[in-house]
Amino acid sequence: MGFEKFGRKSFTSATKVNKFVEFLSAGEIKGTVCKRCGRKFFPPRADCSECLSSEMEWFNLPERGKVLTYTTAFYAPFGFEMDTPYSMALVELSEGLKLFARVSKDVSPEELRTGMEVVVRPVTYEDGQVSFEIFKS
Amino acid sequence: MEKDVAIIGVGQSAFVRGYPGSIRELCFEAFKEAVEDAGISPKEIDATVICSAPEYDKQRSPAGVIAEYLDLIPKPTMYVETVCSSSTTGTKVAYSMIKAGLHDIVAVIGFQKMSEITSAESQERMGRGADIQWESPFGTMMPAYYALYARAYMDRWGLTLDDLASVRVKAATYGQINEKAVYRKAVTMRDFEPSPENRLSEPVASPLRVGDCCANADGSSCIILASKERARAISKKPVWILGIGSASEAVNMSARPEFTMGLRVGIEAARVAYKMAGVAPKDIDVAEVHDCFTIAEIMAYENLGFAAPGEGKELIRAKETYKEGSIPVNVDGGLLSKGHPIGATGGSQLRTIVLQLRGEAGAMQVKDPEIGLVHNIGGVGLYGNVIILGR
């Protein structure tokens, strides 16, 4: 247990990287890096697909990046209807990492652009769920 | 180019909203048409491969129930799933079973009764068709994912909303003349002008609008495959499987390198299929591509080599993918107008190409095609199958 708090609505009760949620609650977004081969992962993984080691440690995700692509949803799956319209974007961070997330409501759909400079920050929603969102740089 | 396995019979139910029967009855419709088309007795079928996307089914493990209803017991049956590409994956499995010499005649039955569950249930399950650990918690859905591809592609290559609408206009041109299509109405560019009266212009996930999205439907398809010896003995017009290619992709968007070059599964599956068939894109006379969204058809043009990267839009602008054009695509209405009953779709695409190659496609017939291609994608480019067929 422990992963129910992730995102607007979680579909996963537990993962070996549950600690990600604790870091988020403490204001940190972290990925995992393989202790053996050094490969970095985001979203975090418990197991390295490169060298098959399960010896991982946490690292701080770069917070700045550029929007690769985005969309604004006007319809939503069951359980997300209250949020529409909401935007989601894929961000290219440094070190070859990418991040997919909700875009903060502070950024209007009209303002969103590919190539736009953004920052990624942890957020806590009113119902206590935690996540990370994309903000204007 | 080997001619070892042929398609000897094809069938599909009408694609409809709210099929008034159960899944076994729905499958019977396609099965009956395919068996009669092949001119065989159901007793001659050695094995079945049953395909659907399980999130819509209340019946667990539907293969047994369907095999029983079709009176195929005790012949072996199994269930195969790769979401929207399930029945072309099933076809690959059946091809392998025959090629390995295990069976001589295998039927692939694809079906989906999307109306089996309520729309609220369906939305919730569709949201879980993505990475449920890292993406579904944001409220993702299929149109939003394809919208990510559309946005990146449009910004890089200058594809316009009108280009996307043009793909739907073409689909509707043929949906009108396909009596098995769910969406039989004409669509014009005016239907996409933003206005409360124009339902097709309503945004779903920007830049995609209602008219950019395929039509959900209930339906079934059946493809009967046979070994070379049996096909030559039974069939007057066998259609040969010349090449099959398949590929997979990361489910998580952040693990994908690129969003402006289409779907990597399409590129890879096409490469393998062309190589196996020993043909090139210019040899294809008619194609069925996975147009679950309008952007998906443009990307397919490029991923199949019908157009260079970024130039897919030129094909639709010049109407080259219409029936009279240089490479007719989805002249049965495609997923957009014919409809997309998930597990039945690949088999329906194969049926269309088989009928085309036999010269039996009626009002949709392309002039004298010799080689046809089916491009069938599962999930958001998660699975891809390309199958090349020849006379």
Image (tube, coloured by chain):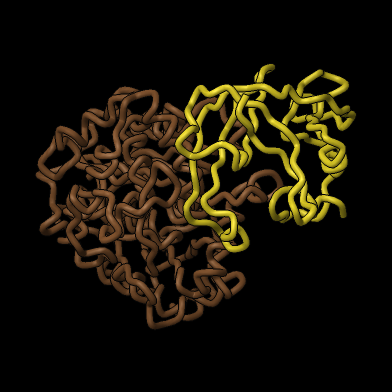
Chain colours: A yellow, B brown
B144 or B69: nearer the viewer: B144
Instruction: Give left or right: position of B254 versus B299.
Output: right
Report whether A57 appears left or right of B41.
Answer: right
Q: Nearer the viewer, residue B224 or A119?
A: A119
Residue at x-position 33% and y-position 41%: B297
Q: Is residue B95 visible?
A: no
What x and y, as percent, mark residue B16? 33, 71
Residue B11 visible, this orientation? yes
Examine the rendered structure and indicate whether residue B90 appears above or below residue B246: below
Q: Which is nearer the eye, B7 or B325?
A: B325
For the N terminus of chain B, the quadrant is top left
Left-right relation of B272 to B185: right
Q: Indicate the position of residue B299 as horizontal and vertical percent values.
A: 36, 34
Question: Quick check: B335 left or right of B129?
Answer: left
Residue B260 position, x and y percent, is 43, 27
Measured as percent of width and height from the top left, residue B293 is found at 37, 47
Quarter of the rendering occupied by the C terminus of chain B: top left
